[in-house]
Structure formats: C-alpha cells, structure tokens
Amino acid sequence: MRATNGPVTLKRRKAVKERVSGAWGTKHTSYKIARQTMIRQSVYAFRDRKAKKGDFRRLWNNRINVAVRALGFTYSKFINALKVANIEINRKMLSELAINQHEIFKTLVEKVMKA
C-alpha cells in the first residue's frame, strides 16, 4: 500500500500560506509563490532589524542637535564636551532628557560647556 504524506503536506503548506496571509494577489494563495514571498519577507525582516538600530541612533542625534542648538551650541561640540568631562550617558537618554525634561538637559549642557 502506498503511503501518502497528505495530512503532513497540507499542514506544512497551510502554515506557509498563513504566514503570508497579508500579501497581495497570488502571493498568499499559491503555495509555490507564497513560499518565495515568505523567504523574501524573512530577508527584509533580518535586514530591517539591523537598519532599525541606525535609524533610532539618527533620530536621537537629531533630537539632541535641535535641543543643543536652541541653547546656542552645536551637536558635535556638545558630544566632545561630554567626552572631555568624562560623562558617559548614551544618546537615547540624552534624547529623552532633551524632550521630556528640558530643564535638566539645559543644566547638563550648561555645566558641560563651561568645563
């Protein structure tokens, strides 16, 4: 008697189709194309997890730059002054201070730039 892998195959194909259910057109209905779509979306996801880190760093740098320029300094001089003053605070926290606690950020900038 011949053994078919019907239930297993159908389950596997159904899982692939569910994973790409948001795709447009044949990409979510045809198994062959759905599998290609799944591979492509995995590549995009891997790439963009890495790119996200740089995107956020650029965002934090821009926020810090705007806040520091409002106080009459430049971003590069401020970052250099932080290093000279031996203050180790990451850009994410500086960005949060600049947006949410502007007075504390202002005192930090003035203290660092005087030194």
Image (cartoon, grey):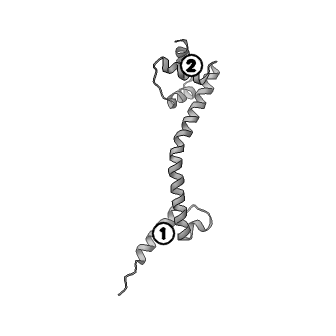
Coordinates of residue 68 in the picture (x, y in percent): 60, 22
* Any part of residue 104 in sight: no
Residue found 54% across the figure and 53% down from its top: 44
Coordinates of residue 64 in the picture (x, y in percent): 58, 27
Instruction: For the N terminus, give its image quadrant.
Output: bottom left
Q: Earlier in the sequence, mark 1 or mark 2?
A: 1
Read off the residue under disc 2: 106
Residue found 58% across the figure and 35% down from its top: 59
Q: Vertical placement of 10 versus 86: above or below?
A: below
Residue found 61% across the figure and 27% down from its top: 65
Residue found 52% across the figure and 55% down from its top: 43
Q: Quadrant of residue 109?
A: top right
Give the class, few, some or many, for how many residues have Cα within 10 Å of label 2's Cα (few <14, many ≥20). some
1 and 2 marks in contact (CB < 8 Å): no
SS under mark 1:
helix
Q: Vertical placement of 115 versus 96: above or below?
A: above
- Looking at the image, the residue that sits furthest to the bottom is 1
Read off the residue under disc 1: 14
Q: Amino acid at mark 1?
A: Lys
* 46 relative to 72 in the view: left or right: left
Q: Amino acid at mark 2?
A: Lys
Distance between mark 1 and mark 2 Cα atoms:
57 Å
Q: Vertical placement of 92 versus 50: above or below?
A: above
* 2 relative to 13 in the view: left or right: left
Coordinates of residue 26 in the picture (x, y in percent): 60, 68
Give the class, few, some or many, for how many residues have Cα within 10 Å of label 1's Cα (few <14, many ≥20). few
Q: Quadrant of residue 103?
A: top right
Towards the viewer: 83 or 108? 83
SS under mark 2:
helix
